């Protein structure tokens, strides 16, 4: 009898005898089984291993083999195909499709494989985060009287006051709501300002998370192109007139992904055009704390220049601190504030008080301005390193604008280069970049990628990433020239987009 059949026979014999032992009862020793069944110790060991793999016995080194507790039978899967009908908009007579495409957001939250250089991150690397200051702030917050009690639904008065002073203008604490980060604030704003089916004007290109919010709310994002000086006022006016939209969402400072700053001569025009259209401007001021060392004096917020309640301002601490410090603010004046407040209360009740207390401790500590200065210096250095490496290693890429704030470069690929192919080839070369297509809500004018310099351990990784990207670009361009089609499939492009712009 060969060894395999001996193992199978012994396992079957032991299996048939298991009912003699209680749950947890000990089986005979290996030596006893060798003598009883006249088989080798190896055969006994393999037979017991097979029973253990089946979940029938448990082996405890030094103690013996015991009968295992029976596994709970798996529940039947059932038939969920009926949901396809229930979730289809047409079946319910809805005018607005109810399907939600969160792929751009979900992909951005996935961690890239080990060893891959993250040129797609939307957050500061841990080495740039104020970890010690945050830990100290959290410890102090936990000792505050009432730290775990229910906060006011609008937020802690002291934190609201701090945000109001940071935003500027005539805003006061009474005009501010504390939110669970910028993404939550944008979601509340769009739900308050635009009914399902309504058009929403957005910059093109723009942050994919905003497009996901708009579509999830049943709204129709309508693109308004931006150039090196921000949104183009004449096209904004035309879009308002053509669509009847009542909301325009913009990032006037270090726009994501282009890095553009709305020019001084256009700021008043944007407010005037929106006022004439009877529309709100949602100002997403996500990067004010990410200004580079050479940025110079920053322009005031649009909210600070708005006397008529046109601007709904969004601000967050997350980008300049940590992905987990999800504290932001919504600021607005007039009747719209009550609607914003009501929607936030319905959705989330309030932001956890310990987190608000910790945020208040952090921004009030001497370490806070030091942290911002350190980040400003490092981001400028990293911008220069990455831009220089791209120009050296990838001369075919165009960098139309070097931003003075934010954490990314917006690069145009050469004509004929397949964007998805390049992104997939870059991932295979060990670099994750963000494909440009998700930043457009309509047809893009060309192939782009976004390269982040904030999420890596240091400038050395930026230079190494550019070297690897050079090989990826050569491969993608070569495949396109040979008529081979995309270098990578959709799966590769999606994987490479991991971390493209993490939820704010």
Image (cartoon, rainbow, N blue to C red):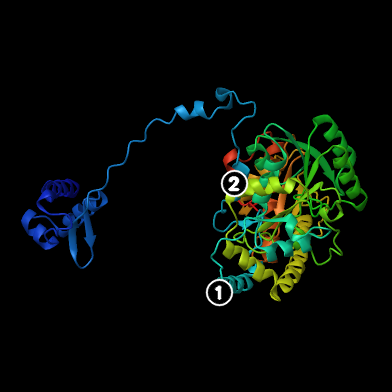
Instruction: Where is residue 158? Give x, y as percent.
Output: 69, 66
Q: How many numbered marks have been drawn onto this rendered protein structure?
A: 2
Residue carrying label 2: 346
Residue beneath disc 1: 143
Q: In the shown orientation, is residue 227 left or right of residue 466?
A: right
Q: Position of residue 107 (x, y in %)?
A: 59, 46
Which of the pair 408/493 is nearer the observer? 408
x and y percent of residue 220 in the render? Answer: 71, 34
Residue at point 58%, 52% (across, down): 349
Most foreground residue, 470 or 160:
160
Q: Earlier in the sequence, mark 1 or mark 2?
A: 1
Residue 378 visible in rendering: yes
Q: Is residue 107 visible?
A: no
Residue drawn 48% across the image and 30% down it: 83
Compared across the picture, whether 277 is left or right of 357 comes to right
Where's residue 408, x and y in %?
74, 55
Q: Secondary structure at mark 1?
A: loop
């Amino acid at each position: 009898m060969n060894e395999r059949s001996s193992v199978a026979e012994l396992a079957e014999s032991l299996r048939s005898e298991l009912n003699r032992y209680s749950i947890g009862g000990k089986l005979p020793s290996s030596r006893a089984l060798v003598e009883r069944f006249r088989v080798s110790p190896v055969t006994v060991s393999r037979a017991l291993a097979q029973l253990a793999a089946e979940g029938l016995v448990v082996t405890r080194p030094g103690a013996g083999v015991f009968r295992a507790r029976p596994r709970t039978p798996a529940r039947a899967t059932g038939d969920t195909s009926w949901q396809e009908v229930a979730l289809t908009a047409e079946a319910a007579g809805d005018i607005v499709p109810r399907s939600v495409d969160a792929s751009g957001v979900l992909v951005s939250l996935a961690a890239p494989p080990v060893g891959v250089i993250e040129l797609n991150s939307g957050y500061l690397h841990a080495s740039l985060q104020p970890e010690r200051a945050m830990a100290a702030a959290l410890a102090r917050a936990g000792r505050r009287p009432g730290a775990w009690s229910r906060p006011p639904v609008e937020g802690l008065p002291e934190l609201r006051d701090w945000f109001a002073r940071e935003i500027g203008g005539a805003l006061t604490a009474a005009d501010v709501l504390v939110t669970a980060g910028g993404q939550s604030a944008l979601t509340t704003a769009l739900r308050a300002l635009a009914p399902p089916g309504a058009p929403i004007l957005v910059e093109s290109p723009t942050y994919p998370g905003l497009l996901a919010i708009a579509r999830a709310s049943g709204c129709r994002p309508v693109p308004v192109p931006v150039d090196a000086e921000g949104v183009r006022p004449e096209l904004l006016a035309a879009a308002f007139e053509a669509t009847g939209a009542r909301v325009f969402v913009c990032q006037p400072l270090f726009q994501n992904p282009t890095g553009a700053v709305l020019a001084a001569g256009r700021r008043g025009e944007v407010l005037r055009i929106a006022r004439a259209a009877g529309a709100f401007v949602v100002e997403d001021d996500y990067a004010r704390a990410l200004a580079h060392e050479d940025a110079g004096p920053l322009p005031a917020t649009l909210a600070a220049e708005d006397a008529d309640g046109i601007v709904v301002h969004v601000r967050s601490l997350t980008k300049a601190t940590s992905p987990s410090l999800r504290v932001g603010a919504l600021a607005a004046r007039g009747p719209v504030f009550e609607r914003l407040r009501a929607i936030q209360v319905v959705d989330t009740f309030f932001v956890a008080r310990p987190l608000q207390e910790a945020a208040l401790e952090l921004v009030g500590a001497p370490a806070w301005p030091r942290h911002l200065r350190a980040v400003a210096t490092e981001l400028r250095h990293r911008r220069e390193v990455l831009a220089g490496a791209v120009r050296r290693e990838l001369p075919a890429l165009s960098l139309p604008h070097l931003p003075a704030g934010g954490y990314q470069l917006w690069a145009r690929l050469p004509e004929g280069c397949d964007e998805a192919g390049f992104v997939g080839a870059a991932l295979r070369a060990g670099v994750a970049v963000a494909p440009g297509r998700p930043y457009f809500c309509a047809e893009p004018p060309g192939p782009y990628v976004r390269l982040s310099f904030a999420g890596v351990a240091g400038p050395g990784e930026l230079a190494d990433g550019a070297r690897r990207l050079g090989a990826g670009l050569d491969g993608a361009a070569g495949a396109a020239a040979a008529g081979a089609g995309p270098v990578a499939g959709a799966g590769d492009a999606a994987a490479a987009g991991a971390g493209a712009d993490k939820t704010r």
